Amino acid sequence: MIAQPLTVLNTRRAPRPRLGVFKFASCDGCQLSLLDCEDELLAVADRVEIAFFREATRRPLEGSFDVSLVEGSVSAPEQEAEIRDVRARSRFLITLGACASHGGIQALRNFSRVDDALAIVYATPETISTLPSSRPASDYVHVDLELPGCPINKRQLLSVLAQMLSGGKPRIDQHALCLDCKRQNVVCVLVAHGSPCLGPVTSTGCGVLCPSYDRPCFSCFGPAPQPNTASLAERFQAIGLSADHIRRLFQMFYNQAPEFLEEARRHE
Amino acid sequence: MTSDPYCPHPAVLRSVEPETPGVATFGMEFQEPARAAAFHHRPGQFNMVYLPGVGEVAISIASAPGEGVGLRHTIRFVGRVTNALQSLRPGAVLGLRGPYGSAWPVEEARGRDVVLVAGGLGLAPLRPAVKALLAERAQYGRLWLLYGARQPSDRLYVAEYADWERAGLELLVTVDRADASWRGAVGIVPLLFRKLALDPSRTLVLTCGPEVMMRATVHEAIDRGVAASDVYVSLERNMQCAVGLCGHCQLGPEFLCMNGPVFPYERVARFLGKEHF
Amino acid sequence: MVNTSAVVMEKSELGNLIARLWAEGYTVVGPTLAQGAIVFDELRTADQLPIGWTDEQEPGSYRLKRRDDGAYFGYAVGPHSWKKYLFPARLTLFSIERTADSFAVHQGSTDVPRYAFLGVRSCDLHAIAVQDRTFLHGPYVDPHYERRRERAFIIAVQCGTAASTCFCASMNTGPRATQGFDLALTELPEAFVVEVGSERGGALLVGLNVRAANGEIEAAHQVTETTKRQMTRTLDTSDMPALLYENLDHARWDDVAGRCLSCTNCTMVCPTCFCHSVDEVPDLLGERSERVRQWDSCFNPELSHVAGGSTRPDIRARYRQWLTHKLASWIDQFGVSGCVGCGRCITWCPVGIDLTEEVAAIRGSDRA
């Protein structure tokens, strides 16, 4: 599906654009980021009609949406039809977070047999209906924009909404996290402390949260474009990390991202 | 104190003329009469066009100096900013700053033959050169415009061709894909060179279009005996500041926004064909 | 040679010098300890300096170490450079307010801090002069840089120690600072030798406890001579820019592309890199936008983005762009090299890529 231009969002006289917030398999953390906007949420509610948001309102699902925010992965059989329905109702579909764009933490089960996982987790696994793997929305429908993060950064979400309300197609920065560490005067934890930081291969957006507390990046925003994971992994090896440690670093929030999947395999 | 070179100035969109699918010409006028009066550009230069809330984009000036009121910009709606520009209607307010960059050697061409070679939207920055050359037609020898478009419906400024030809321009058009109505040439534009009776020693070549097309044009011209220093190209990169400060549009030792976009080919020859440089 | 107008100042007097600068309206910034490194921040007192500390630098590694003396300036350059003050990493240039039938431009405050930089090394003095050429001496002047630069008071420090990553001597940019400062300090065991580089530098000393220098001048000269001999790294710049221009297809670019993370760190810590982006940041109400300028990098694929993709779509192209610009085309553009030999890009590269080695490899098999 081709996205329509968002010019209607720029017209003050037009009815407020309709926004829908949808949840699939997820922890709700990304939706909470939206609720966490507090002050800004009032401004958002002033400019857009929040027409469906189960976490915040009781309105039933009906009609179409100018912008849909989709949280969570497709993990259960009925969700395949649901994501197609959301897409059909939406002009511009934005996924929120690692689950919706790459399967998320729950996609760790993609590495094992789903029946084995069910037997470990549930007392009555035969009552559970699930897909063999946790899939991103983009496996089923066209996605206009993927907001990364586990959870997303509310500033990035607000920026995307503000850009759309101003009449532009939204863009987000996707360069390596390091650029923002340096802009914010944060000392490199890999170079100065020898901490195994994934920042050089990770997309920006978090506001350099971990490095600014002297903690290495765990890549909860996923791979930056063209990440040179092999070179970074070699560096990790040189500072003393075991192959297993390196594999686990690449098998976290974005374990299904092709670049991380492949790098993890090299350290099995 | 130095004024801020990044600062846009309000301009009103006066007209939107559809050109081809996905391309239109915007007529704009500075809101402040003093700024309009102080604005002087040369053919081949560009402006930064600013849409509040969305951003800025470099667009060549398609009107000739002194051609009517305001400034014209032919825009392809292909990027983030230009896509948003597409929705604007006359009366909308935009920002403009400029003019920036180098110009076609219209003065230096006096007494010479000139071959203008345009590909696709590359005719837009050459249009003011066409107008300037024709405005003083007697000053020049033979004037050719070789123009290549993907298909007949992608040609810009079709309504003006007859005027240009009457004024003394020899126009040769070619398309990559003909339709049922097309009676003209089919093929890439540099091949049109082979149809010209050139006197290479008195010929200047000005070209603008996709880089691969310009390189082929340059080679045709040089093969025909035109000196590399008499071939001018207009280059495109990501231009953000337009004043040589931001580093986005670099090609080797050149900032295209400031030293270009128009260069004598021999100045950029070393780097132009270098893949990904 | 050491400036003959040099005087001697007891170490304890440095605090008074800092206080004098604050009293005259300067915001004093200089080296201090934070986050396990020596960084630049505001200094109210002399004891905020990393007294008794040094750094051990290797490609891709930086560690603080205790010294066995109480030296005030016994370390080399850290991750920060002075460009963070003169060319801030993020700056709202102006804001745009939509009005009924137009828009209005609101310039940000022009009342920027008057900085006093304490502890500027020779390489960094040269770096400031290099950025001056970009922002002040071209056809267009950047008023944001100009405003900060023209008010800055510069106190240089002559280097008493070189890191393993330093190579200023081979770039002719150090270790001795000879110009571009208001005052220059050389640290001796018991006192500072203070050279006066400007009228306002001399004026600042009036009323401070200083005395005429005698034998200290030669001792100060020996400090930088010793540092120069410590320096092991060199960059051979002969045949620049031709060497790199003639080797744009060298196999070494593929080799370094296998190691380079394209993470932008080298360009961020480089005191001369000036690439930046200006982004539109609209508010939610659609009434105002800010035009925000931020440091950008040729290692960010977005930098060369045009309709149809990136002009430099892979790491090989981006590393080649950085190195050829820094060492070659910079000379064509600005008349000087873009490299001042500070070594920051070597230390702060997470995988320890060393530009001196890359150039040597290309030189070793010229036109391979």
Image (tube, coloured by chain):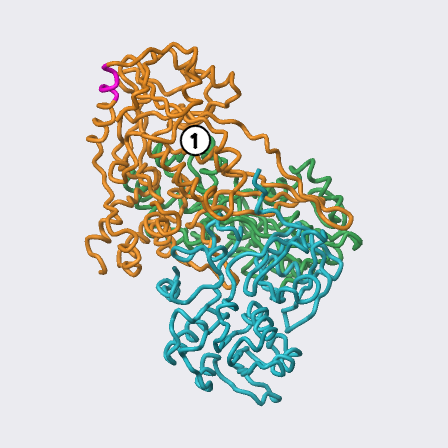
Chain colours: A green, B cyan, C orange
Query: Residue at image x 66%, y 79%?
Result: B159
Position of residue B146 relative to residue A51, above or below, is below
Position of residue C227 measured from the top left corner of the image (x, y, whole percent): 23, 28
Q: Is residue C217 magenta?
A: yes
Residue C342 visible:
yes
- Overall secondary structure of the magenta stretch? helix
Left or right, C60 with respect to A130, comes to left
Query: Residue at image x 43%, y 77%?
Result: B202
Q: How many marks?
A: 1
> Which quadrant, please, contains the N terminus of chain C?
top left
Element under disc 1? loop
Q: Chain of mark 1?
A: A
Q: Nearer the viewer, residue C323 or B201?
A: B201
Query: Residue at image x 43%, y 15%?
Result: C17
> Which quadrant, please, contains the C terminus of chain C?
bottom left
Position of residue B147 relative to residue C256, above or below, is below
Residue A1 visible:
no
Q: Which residues lie in the magenta part?
A: C215-220
Left or right, B60 with respect to C46, comes to right
Q: Is residue B171 magenta?
A: no
Query: Residue at image x 25%, y 52%?
Result: C239
Position of residue B182 measured from the top left corner of the image (x, y, whole percent): 59, 87
How many residues crowd mark 1 within 10 Å: few (<14), some (14–19), many (20+)? some
Q: Which residue is mark 1?
A: A214
Q: Nearer the viewer, residue C280 or A133?
A: C280
- State which quadrant residue B265 falls in: bottom left
Position of residue C18 measured from the top left corner of the image (x, y, whole percent): 44, 17
Position of residue C200 measured from the top left corner of the image (x, y, whole percent): 44, 22
> Which amino acid does the dot numbered 1 rest on?
Asp
